[in-house]
Structure formats: structure tokens, C-alpha cells
Image (tube, coloured by chain):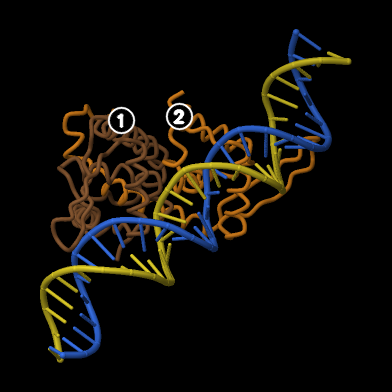
Chain colours: A brown, B orange, C blue, D yellow
DNA sequence: CTTTAATGTATCGCATGACTATATATAGTC
DNA sequence: GACTATATATAGTCATGCGATACATTAAAG
């Protein structure tokens, strides 16, 4: 319902995916659902967005993957490696700095608006 | 120096420009400088980004403009209209909700990282 | 048993928009 | 005269999120 403007999420999706992967290995579909629930239904990353993103992270050598063909449903498991964990902390810090910057810019405007929970 | 990843700023630039315009009419070059100083040098929007953005806001009827040819340097002044002010408050609220969402997602990761000022 | 929905991965084409480079012109400084 | 700052504008490039589509398996519903 309260989905965000796609343009707003651009540049943060990587970070979200990395942060979900931080809690352990996931395959795509699972990651998609965990992100959805972790964001309380606010972020619903589409398959056409997720898989290219994962492939990108993989070719950037931030995650490693392993196929599981033991069942009829083939699953591709992704896991953060050392570079991925580092990227996550760096990008998280950058994001907080950015958010703080915007917050300051908006401060004069949002003084009249009730703060979010 | 500490410039942000362009992809990160995508989807927020409109909001920043609107918020700068909230303090009164500005022409492009002035707006660019005020945004730069208001963000303590962290945001440096380029001319090739700013002017198309302003034209977009104008064609969306969120700002009105007026040429000033009284001096040798022609300046195009931009001013928020009612729709623009409304858009600003709506987008600001949306941004805070989004930031809150990301903050929650990152919380498990950033527990070990010192909070920004 | 047949149909539908959910699971699971993947690619293609489209649209958006930020960037660099470039163009043009005036005004002030060295 | 040359260079920098001021001031606006457009063209081309690139990254990436999205919808549509494809394909295969499994579970649930009728």
C-alpha cells in the first residue's frame, strides 16, 4: 500500500539487500520476502529488480553464490563475503550521513509536521 | 569532498530544491549556491542537473518563473506556487517515512557504528 | 483430476534522471 | 588581453528500477 516512490529507493536497494543478507545466507525469493516483512510491507522489491541486482553484487564480488539442486525447486543461495560486509558498513554509514544532511535541509520545512514514530 | 553517491541522491534532489525554494524566490545559480552552503558543502548540484530539474518542476506546475533582463546577466527567478508547497510537505513526509524504514532495516547492522551528530 | 496459485530464477525493453561535456554571453579581475 | 566568476541551456551517455514475459516445479482448491 504505502509503497515508496521508486526513484526514492534508487541507490538504497543495494544497501537493503546487503543488510538482509547480513543475517545469513538467503536465496532470492526468500530474500525478497524477508525484505518485505522486515520493512513491514513497505518495500516490495520485484523479481525483475532483485535478480539483476544480485547478479550485479555477485559480479562486484560482494557476495558468493551456490546452487542447490537437491530438490525440484532449484535455489541459488547468496552469502555475504568479507568485501560485502565491509561494503555494507561503509554504505550504511554513508546513508546515515546523507539522511542527516537531508534532515537538516528539511528541518525548517518540517517543523510544523509531526515526527514519525 | 564528502560528496554523496549520485545514485543515492536520486529521488531526493527535487525535494532539496523545493526546500531551498521554500525560503523565497531564487534563480538557478543562487539556488545552487544556497543548497551547497545549506548542506555544508555536502551537496553540489551541477548546472547540467539543476536546470533540467527546474524545467521539470516548472512543466509540472510546481514552480512559476519570471525572467529578469534588467541587467546584462539575464536571470530566471523561480518561486514555489501553492502546488509546489504542497508537494514539498508531502514529499518531506514521505522522505521521513522512508528514512525511518531504512533506519530500522539498518539497525541490526549499525548497532556497532557510532551515531551521527 | 484439473485448474489455479505459489514458488523460484531469469531476461528484455522502457523510462527516468543524474552526470559530463559543451555552448553561449556578460562582468569583473589581473 | 586573458582569465575567472556569473548565468542559463542542451546533447549524449550511463545506471538502474520497473513491467512484461518466459519457464519449471509444487501445493492447494475446485
Q: Chain of mark 2?
A: B
Query: Based on the displayed image, in which of its 4 quarters is residue D6 positioned?
Result: top right
Q: Residue at x 37, y 47 (%)?
A: A110
Quarter of the picture containing the C terminus of chain B is top left
Question: Which numbered marker is on residue A90?
Answer: 1
Q: Alpha carbon of mark 2 to alpha carbon of mark 1: how far? A: 14 Å
- The residue at which mark 2 appears reads as B3
Which of D7/B2 is in front? B2
Label 2's element? loop
Label 1's element? helix
Q: Residue A24 in the image: x percent, y percent?
A: 15, 43
Q: Chain of mark 1?
A: A
Q: Residue at x 32, y 59 (%)?
A: A47
Judged left or right of residue A32, residue D9 is right
Q: Residue B26 in the image: x percent, y percent?
A: 61, 42
Which of A68/A58 is in front? A68
Q: Residue C29 in the image: x percent, y percent?
A: 74, 13
Residue B55 visible in the picture: yes
Q: Residue at x 46, y 57 (%)?
A: B87
Same chain for mark 2 and mark 1? The answer is no
Judged left or right of residue D16, residue B84 is right
Residue B104 visible in the picture: no
Amino acid at each position: 500500500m504505502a509503497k515508496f516512490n521508486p526513484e526514492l529507493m534508487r541507490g538504497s536497494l543495494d544497501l537493503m539487500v546487503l543488510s538482509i543478507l547480513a543475517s545469513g545466507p538467503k536465496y532470492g525469493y526468500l530474500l525478497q520476502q524477508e525484505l518485505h516483512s522486515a520493512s513491514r510491507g513497505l518495500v516490495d522489491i520485484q523479481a525483475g529488480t532483485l535478480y539483476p541486482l544480485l547478479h550485479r553484487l555477485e559480479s562486484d564480488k560482494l557476495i558468493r553464490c551456490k546452487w542447490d539442486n537437491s530438490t525440484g525447486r532449484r535455489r541459488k543461495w547468496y552469502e555475504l563475503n568479507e568485501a560485502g560486509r565491509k561494503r555494507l558498513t561503509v554504505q550504511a554509514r554513508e546513508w546515515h550521513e546523507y539522511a542527516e544532511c537531508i534532515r537538516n535541509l528539511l528541518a525548517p520545512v518540517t517543523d510544523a509536521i509531526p515526527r514519525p514514530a
